[in-house]
Amino acid sequence: MSGTIRLGLNIPLFTASLISIGLGTFTGMIGIWGYAAQKLAIPEWIKVGHAHDSWWAVLIMIAAVTLPSLPLARWFRNFVIAASFISPGLWLLSFYSYYAHGIESAKYLMPVFEILLFLSLLGVALVASGVNIPIITTRDKPATGRYDIVSNIEISRRIFLIPTIVAVIGVLAGFGLAGLFKAYHKPISPAALVQLHDHLVLISVSAVISLLVLRVVNASEKVFNLATRLMEISLPLTALGLILFNFLGLSSLVWVVPAGIYFMIPIITFLTLIGVLPRSPSYNTYISALRASLAVVYAMILILVAQGAYISMIWDTNPYVTVTFKQPQGQPYPGPYPTEFLGTAPVKGTPRGLENAHLSPGSWSHVAAMWLTILGLVGPNIFVERLRRPGLLYLFLITIPLAPLFNMIGRYLAWWPGLPEGAPGGIGALWYAGHPLKGFNIISLFVISLVLLYLAPQKKIVEKSVSITK
């Protein structure tokens, strides 16, 4: 295998990712409008199902941009697509059946769908990293399929290996939490095992997205190589730090400091987007708009990720702290902390606005960054050459960053004490602006993906020269 791969888009996988994030978002909407807006406690299945299906969508999107150039055996390529379509939905149904209705058999179906999706995406990630796995690869040169779009942007395979290894540690920790604690309704102990699970996956994915963005917006080789090296240093150290934090009870600094090295990657990405760090010239019509849109997203990512570090240094300093939050019935959003609750949510005393902003718009921002990356790779091919609607490209460059922006504003205002008594609450910025925008983005992109699936058999979609960045 060569040391680089050409990025692009596999349309069926992109469609599957939109279904997954649609399910995750719809589940979250049920939590907001069916419970939180009615001052009711949000059930556990909604919170966990919302988060998992939404982040699985991001992983599927990363697979979608690498799949067209990978020498995968036909059976495995079909397996990846099938698992990405069916696993998120069936897992969510099983999760709901067990936690909401107590159907015992559903408990044993959940890991089946999780493992299928995990193995399929792991295979893609390893092959993208340059690992040769004979059973799932072929010696033939990858051929562009009728449902593939291939751009002229290449990226080093090395950006995928370390994040894959670190993310696998996080995923295995998640399987352990599900099997040892969640399946038996036991409190997770030490509580910071939750961070070992989700933070290793999320930080790894975040680093990969940033490196994809740097390549798409023509960052200089020195800048890209620096960011890659920071990723290779920070992710293993963060994993080690979280393990030591959980099992030896060391200070939270043992993992926050190496995570700070990771934090330099989105800083570098933001500085590149606004032109402070060098990048190669481009004369394409869309590149300036793309960079501006991504700059807004990365400004949010910097703020929201930094909040997580602050929370970890001020409140989440002990892995054995009993986690105490559960929103009580009949209390206004975001609700006070009860005196005692054995659950899996923020440490008592953590400002809910900071915690919610770190989690929710922080996640949305990464979805937005990945969508914009895809537009940078294949946007002109889709909207100019295929659909002949270039205005839609500009539309998405505006609406995609606005959704997490209103989410972030709403999360902050939700706990702002300056709002007048009886006011509907600053959370309305999320409910009445952020949610409709995100829904519009998901539904419209899904419709476009269906149109592309319809058009693809009539003519192969191969991007020969046109991309936003060239």
Image (cartoon, helix red, strand yellow):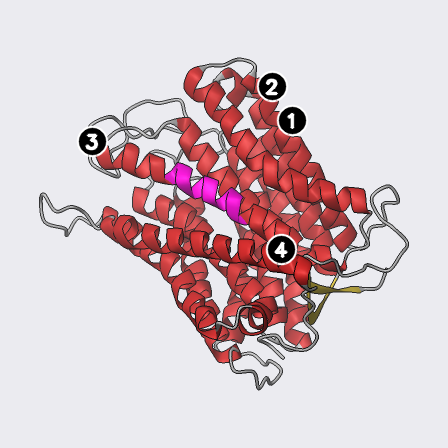
Position of residue 142 in the picture relative to residue 174 (left or right)? right
Residue bearing mark 4: 11
Q: How far apart are the alpha carbons under marks 1 and 2? A: 7 Å
Q: Mark 1 or mark 4: which is in front?
A: 4
- Mark closest to the chain's N terminus, 4 or 2: 4
Q: Mark 3 or mark 4: which is in front?
A: 4
Residue at 63% of width from left, 44% of height from top?
A: 239
Q: Position of residue 200 (x, y in %)?
A: 59, 44
Mark 1–mark 2 CB contact (< 8 Å): yes
Position of residue 437 in the picture relative to residue 393 (left or right)? left
Q: Compared to 86, does 462 lie above or below? A: below
Classify 10 Å Cα crowding around label 2: few (below 14), some (14-19), many (20 and above). Answer: few
Q: Mark 3 or mark 1: which is in front?
A: 1
Tag 2: amino acid? Tyr
Mark 4–mark 2 CB contact (< 8 Å): no
Residue bearing mark 3: 331
Residue at 42% of width from left, 43% of height from top?
A: 25
Occupied quadrant, residue 243: top right
Residue bearing mark 1: 112
